[in-house]
Amino acid sequence: MANSNKVSFPTPCRVVVKVGTRLLTHSTGKLNLGYMEKLARELSDLRNQGHEVILVSSGSIGAGRGRLNIMHKEVTIPEKQAIAAVGQGLLVQIYEKLFSEYGLIVGQILLTRTDLVSRKRYINACNTVLTLLKLGVVPIINENDSVSVEELKFGDNDRLSALVAGLSDAHLLVLLTDIDGLYTSNPRKDPEARLIPVVEKIDDKIKAGADKSHDDLATGGMVTKLQAAEIATNSGVGMYITGGSDPGVISRLIKGEHEGTYFRPQVHFLNRRKRWIAYGQVIKGWVTVDQGACNALCSSNKSLLPVGVVSVEGNFEAGDLVAVKDLNGEEIGRGLCNFSSQELARIMQRTSPEIADIIERPFAEEVIHKDNLVIY
Ligand code: GLU
């Protein structure tokens, strides 16, 4: 490996490890206890060395299907949620048993997408994770599949683990998977595919190589892994995608050995509040801005003013998250809007004195203040 690929992490290192269903279950659908044992041993050993470990574990649906003996049958959403309720209990019961053999305590956190939408709940989740770490506990996190509403889900643990890495200020996120990294194209289909050792920036070429993979039990593929990499690196967290059949790889990565694909964190990454705006929130609408406003937002770190808005889509309230698009329809950023969609439709393209005659309440001058705006 070339020297420029060298990666190093602080000691102790705060590491989030995400493990997918394919590694955690056999092809029969039953839990792979041998693998879970190796993983618990590896994470316990890291903890004994003083590192801080957070585990984001999939497998509730896989384990639940195995336990209930409904392996490959199509199931309804309520059935899937019931399956997850059975599987999640089983999963954590086994982790608790395995980690306690090495003298460690685990704590389960189940998150839903809506838990991160409110700033208060986002901070609350963050405090719980950090307190568990302080107590020497290994947090084990999964999506709360039993109660999550289908339209409003993380849907995959790749992005969930990146959000967790961001909210816990981790140094490293490791996605353990059954493929040994990111390739120039899908290596299962293309013999010419080459492994990419380090990604400095997730550009269109990198995205084009990612191929959506499907599986009976697992969710996500390279596409969601790249989305996770975007969240992690913009949150200042380095991320590895690596083959996880030997969990010993985590120690090697922390020591600076290189296996798989490393996504380098951005130098100018988002602060915690902007991470929450960019990734915790759910978009409620869209505003399109003219070229002048686009330049001011992208190059001069300015707030968005009503005069620069040319159209409004969606139905949102003041304080909601909206995406900002340029005239080509490309999303250039997102932020918390000071006006409702109805108000904005009436004041767009107008100057401040004109707005005072339209809005009959105290109002901010900006549509989105620069402190509440994230530009990509
Ligand atoms: N939360 C799902 C489960 O526990 C997994 C989602 C994923 O595989 O990314 O089954």
Image: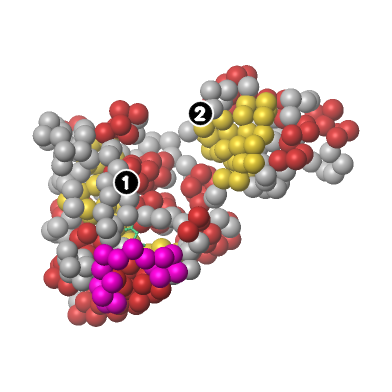
Q: Reading the chain from its start, which is encountered first: label 2 or label 1?
A: 1
Query: Which image quadrant: the N terminus?
Result: top left
**Pointer 2 residue Cβ closer than 8 Å to ligand 1:** no
Disc 1 crowd rating (10 Å Cα; few below 14, some 14-19, many 20+) is: many
138 in relation to 355, above or below: below
- Name the residue that disc number 1 marks: 225
Q: Amino acid at mark 1?
A: Lys
Q: Amino acid at mark 2?
A: Glu
Is 68 inside the magenta-drawn segment? yes
Give the SS element for disc 1: helix
Please report the bounds of the magenta region as a residue range: 66-81
Residue plotted at (48% across, 64% down) = 148
Q: Position of residue 189 (x, y in %)?
A: 16, 38
70 in relation to 330, above or below: below
- Name the residue that disc number 2 marks: 330
Give the SS element for disc 2: loop
Quarter containing ligand 1?
bottom left
Choose between 349 and 329: the one closer to the eye. Answer: 329
Choose between 157 and 43: the one closer to the eye. Answer: 157
Query: Which of the 4 quarters of the picture holds residue 244?
Result: bottom left
267 displayed left or right of 10: right
Q: Position of residue 154 (x, y in %)?
A: 43, 55
Q: Is residue 177 visible?
A: yes
Q: Position of residue 317 (x, y in %)?
A: 70, 48
